[in-house]
Amino acid sequence: MKFKNNSLLLVLSAVLFVLASPIAVVAQNLDPANLLKPRADSWPIYHGDYSGRRHSTLRQITQQNVANLTLAWAFQTKDKGSEIKSSPLLVDGVLFFTVPDNVWAVDARSGQMIWHYNRPSTQGQHIGHRGVAMYKGWLYFTTPDCHLISLNAKDGTVRWDKTYADVNQGYWATMAPLVVGNHVIAGVSGDLDNLVGYLRSFDPETGKVQWQWNSTPPAGTPNATTGGMTWMTGTYDPELNLVYWGTGNPTPVLNGTTRPGDDAYTCSIVAINPDTGALVWGFVVSPHDTHDWDAVETPVLVDADFHGQPRKMLMQTSRNGYFFVLDRVTGKSLLTAPFGPVNWALGIDKQGRPIPNPDKEPAPDGRLIAPDEGGMTNFRAPSFDPKTGLFIVDAHPSYSIYFAKPADGTYGWAGADYGVWGKGVIEAIDYQTGKIRWSHEVGPDGAGAGVLTTDSGLTFTGDAFGNFLVLDTSNGKTLWHAGTGEQMQSSPITYELDGRQYVVAGSGGVLFAWALPQSFATGTH
Amino acid sequence: MRRFRNIAMLVAVTAWLVLVCKDTPTHAAARAVAGAAQAAGDAVQDSPGGKSYAANCAICHGDHLEGNLPAFPPLTGVGHHLNDQQITDIIQNGKGVMPGNQDVKGDELAALLRFLASADESTAKPDAGGAAGAHPSDLAQKGGVLFQQNCAFCHGRDTMGGESGPDLTQSKIVLADVNGDKIGEVVRAGRPEKKMPAFNFSAPELESIVAFIHAQEALAATRKGDRRGVAVADLQTGDAAAGKRYFEGAGGCVKCHSPTGDLAGVAKRHQGLDLEERMLYPEGAKSKVTVTQPSGKTVAGTLAYLDEFTVALRESDGEYHSWLTARVKYKVDSPVDAHVDLFGKYTDADIHNLMAYLQTLR
């Protein structure tokens, strides 16, 4: 009888569980705890984990066996003209990735499609899309016309759809939101108009707005800037409960006359409380920018020694050509050093910020500027390798000419600029000194691939010719490569399923999964 | 006990529901299309061809053949660039994302083709001079929508320049273009050396974009003194004599160039921004390479390709050869690198002076 009672209890609790949380049972499900410490069989956040280091502890693929790396599968989006610029998420064996207007769910073992969500939109820039965010069984997808859409991860059906910026004013969206606790944090794009950049936080269940943080004062404020778009995914320190986000350039873009001063918080790194949206500190990476150098590149969070002292640091290789190390508790500078040719600053001020040279502002007869407007690096992610202390980034030494004259006005772009030369170099920066420990040339104009490192001393990236590269993290030497037929515009990810390590990277319209042969990986045939 | 059985049944039913849900993923897009089909039902003409169009085509191409760009091209004027056989082929075998439909055949197919042709005549405006039968302003408007989505980020919303992309209303290519013959080429192939990607637009889409660009070009031409962008007049601030000294001295230009040789008349061939860009870095300049094969035999030619793994050249007769870099020795002679070396040395005044000097070489 006792046994019977127990089994009855068990059945009852099972029924109650099923009735109380049907979603949890039927859906692809992301345990919120996994966001704090992602398992090896997952890649649940845009950057893999909250730190943005894009470093994996996986070590099945090694310097010794990488020569055997082979194609596990390839998935073709067949979406005309759209290059994959997103980082997939991996949860419960399913990859979720995007191009503008489209989300795919693909089996991470086989590369077979599970579902495809397509929502054609005619408004907003369709220049790229970075990916989705996930909370429990739900995905969050931004659209070119500025909707935030919650999809059922199980089948791609829409749960809710919220407009979060006005596409008619000139906003658009490309970014992958960041989930922190019960907040879905989304940012906006919009460079063609004088608009205020902002972050907005949503309730993951209902889509209700929780808070909004604005980068700048309202448009029309005298002598104030607009801009500061929030178009890349930030990072998060659970201990400090701070979200770190990079903000974009000020507007008007190339003409700074109507916005004297630093133009905070454009071209900045900001620390924000994810529960309230309150700014805790801000650091202006490019004071009074006139070259379109968004500071949205990953704010990478590293806990390590700095000059003999343990530090909670934030590192960014910024589009303006400088590598920044900040104390992320206080937002104070620890190190600022260029990581390629820069010619627009007079020096570094006491706060660790480059001092813009007024003679290098865009002018009617042109100014030669390094780097170019695409910057010394851009949205593709860098990686921090803890063992070597190297910050590895796809750098773009480059020169361009910048023009601005009264006829260009003070709205939107407000000038013109032309890249004249550039090249791609994978650089390994010593974070203690800012010195470049090694560099590996990846071709003319620039490469564009992001970087991933693993505990086995490997660096995964791509070159300007469309080769997927595996380098030795300690010296940058090439260990393996494969031509993908198109320049990679995405950042690779890695995960382990059934004892086999995969490295996944989009190139052109194809998602490639590389792995050791099954027999190597699992010791069986 | 009965209670227990009820609970057990409830569990079973719930489990079944869960399984059913799991096994039948619903595709949001497919559902949206089904919804659109209902809305489309009542609008198209009553003829047999019209009915066939409503049943098979209107979902995507619109009740009035207006299309829904960028995914679904308009079919107004489809007869201008496709014949009946080509249209039949697309209907039956599909194209791109469009599925084929083998069920449309015989009388129904003939009626549908007639309907497409008649719809074309009724919408065409012969006096408008627009391609594909649509009024140019409509066409430009359609193109404008596509331009905003795909081109505006780089070229600006009004085509007059933006993030990294040049002002198209002052572009040589646009000025020389006739009905998309030049623009189409660039859009379809891209300009990899300038980082412009290739776009895969359908012919009607491209036509509309071209119409939009030319409409903007006409608009820009009406603005006289306050043209945005870089005018030839803006690039006249240098001192030609100082430029000549730089050319012969610090710049080291005379190592490769001569004002009476390769640069004679250069200011006639290139002006303004075009000249300045070429001066700073002559895009597409060729390098020479000599490859020494394992046998010791050397082959020389114009460098055709070089990455870490492969080197390729073209011999003077056009013959193409490639080798794995690991198996040969090679030496590249790239005089254009002298331009790169100057970037770190130039002052802005050096550039303006050099520009002034080159503009005297007419």
Image (spheres, coloured by chain):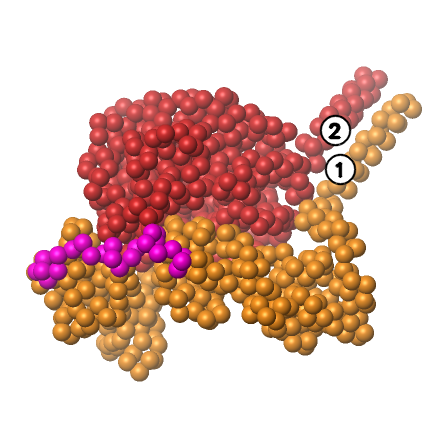
Chain colours: A red, B orange
B336 lies left or right of A263 = left
- Position of the N terminus of chain A, as image quadrant, is top right
The image quadrant that residue A221 belongs to is: top left
Q: Residues within 10 Å of mark 2 (few under 14, many from 20)?
A: some
Residue placed most toward the observer, A166 or B137: B137
Compared with residue B189, is residue B237 higher up or lower down, i.e. above or below?
Answer: above
Q: Secondary structure at mark 2?
A: helix
Q: Is residue B232 magenta?
A: yes
Compared with residue A113, is residue A334 higher up or lower down, i.e. above or below?
Answer: above
Q: Chain of mark 1?
A: B
Q: Amino acid at mark 2?
A: Val
Q: Chain of mark 2?
A: A
Residue placed most toward the observer, A392 or B102: B102
Q: Which mark is residue B18?
A: 1
Which residue position is annotated with label 2? A18
Q: Position of residue B228 (x, y in %)?
A: 34, 52
* Residue at point 74%, 49% (across, down): B35
- Position of the C terminus of chain A, as image quadrant, is bottom right
Q: Position of residue A114 (x, y in %)?
A: 65, 49
Q: Position of residue A24 (x, y in %)?
A: 67, 31
Compared with residue A453, is residue B59 higher up or lower down, i.e. above or below?
Answer: below
Q: Tell me whether circle 1 and circle 2 mark residues in contact (CB < 8 Å).
A: yes
User: Residue most toward the bottom?
Assistant: B317
Start and end of the magenta stretch?
Answer: B220-246
Q: Position of residue B200 (x, y in %)?
A: 52, 62
Q: Amino acid at mark 1?
A: Val
